[in-house]
Amino acid sequence: MRFAGVDLSKPKVMGVINVSPESFFKGSVKQSEEELIQTVLKMVEDGASFIDVGAKSTAPYLETQIPVEEEVRRAVWAIKTIREHVDVPISIDTTSARVAEEALKAGADIINDVSGLKGDENMAKVAKEYDVPVIVCAHKKVGDFKDPVHEVIKALEESLQIAYKHGIEKEKIAIDPAIGFLRPNWPPWYEWDSKVLANLNLLKVFGLPILVGVSRKSFIGAITGRKDPMERLAGSLAATAIAVWNGAHIIRTHDVRETVDAVKMAAFMRTFNP
Ligand SMILES: Nc1nc2c(c(=O)[nH]1)N=C(COP(=O)(O)OP(=O)(O)O)CN2
Ligand SMILES: Nc1ccc(C(=O)O)cc1
């Protein structure tokens, strides 16, 4: 299996860079050109196979609205700068078709849409027109659910319908269970996220690359009692190992060096439990 030209026979790591000061983990925020370049070079040296760039936080518990022009400005600046320094595929983390298009023109290779092509009706059109791979996240309004992973599967099916209707090929799609984004009234979201990760292997039915982002998220804070995202690295590595054990192909992380080691450990042991 491949995604954006990257071989996924062994799981790979995607390094996260945010140029959005409002992002929930301040350690991921880069605002000067020098910081951006140093960080991206280090991530690739540490083993990142992809770089994901976010120009607006999508944290469901933060106030994150900024004008689309500002998101475009941040994204284009970051992507142009990063593109000049590394060759790995760059994804643009946005739910706006306008931002995605400008980012692609600036040198991005992949669209990462946490709304699963449902947030902006032009997103699938842009993906098709520029003929780029897309990451679709499970996205839906959640009420009270007993069976999180099946809700995730249903939400992903809807996104795939949208993609196929617009002529996006299967080979160009990766799926993502959207850890931290789906927040029902019941069960509590940290239980929802844990149930999804514990049953992630069920997403293999799609036959598509599975991308998972657990890095420093609030379900880890809730389970470990670590309120500050700065304190959540160990919890993130444990969740990463579970995700890889259960079939994740790409792990999206703020901490490339540590995550590469956790991924290697889980992937190696998994080969003895086929
Ligand atoms: N495909 C995918 N994209 C994502 C995911 C994720 O799990 N999967 N998590 C995010 C949250 O992390 P980030 O550090 O970007 O937080 P922010 O939204 O506050 O910037 C943002 N983007
Ligand atoms: N964009 C997101 C940022 C953070 C979280 C989380 O902490 O669960 C979820 C989504």
Image (cartoon, grey):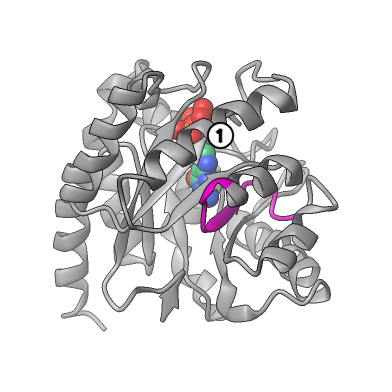
Residue shown at 34% from the left, 58% from the top: 88
Instruction: Give the residue pinned by disc 1.
Output: 75
Q: How many marks?
A: 1
Picture coordinates of residue 231, whole percent (x, y): 26, 22
| Whether residue 149 is situated above or below residue 30 in the rendered picture | below
Residue shown at 37% from the left, 39% from the top: 215
Label 1 element class: helix
Picture coordinates of residue 223, whole percent (x, y): 37, 31
Task: Give the farthest residue toward the front.
Answer: 84
Picture coordinates of residue 84, whole percent (x, y): 36, 45
107 inside magenta stretch: yes
Name which residue type carries label 1.
Ala
Q: Quadrant of residue 99?
A: top right
| Whether residue 68 is situated above or below residue 141 in the rendered picture | above
Quarter of the figure with the N terminus: bottom left
25 inside magenta stretch: no
Q: Quadrant of residue 125?
A: bottom right
| Whether residue 180 is situated above or below residue 64 in the rendered picture | below
Would residue 236 be visible to someone looking at this image? yes
The answer to whether residue 112 is left or right of residue 115 is left
Residue shown at 30% from the left, 62% from the top: 12
In this rendered view, identify the residue nearer to me: 234 or 104.
104
The answer to whether residue 187 is left or right of residue 23 is right
* Residue segment shown in magenta: 106-117
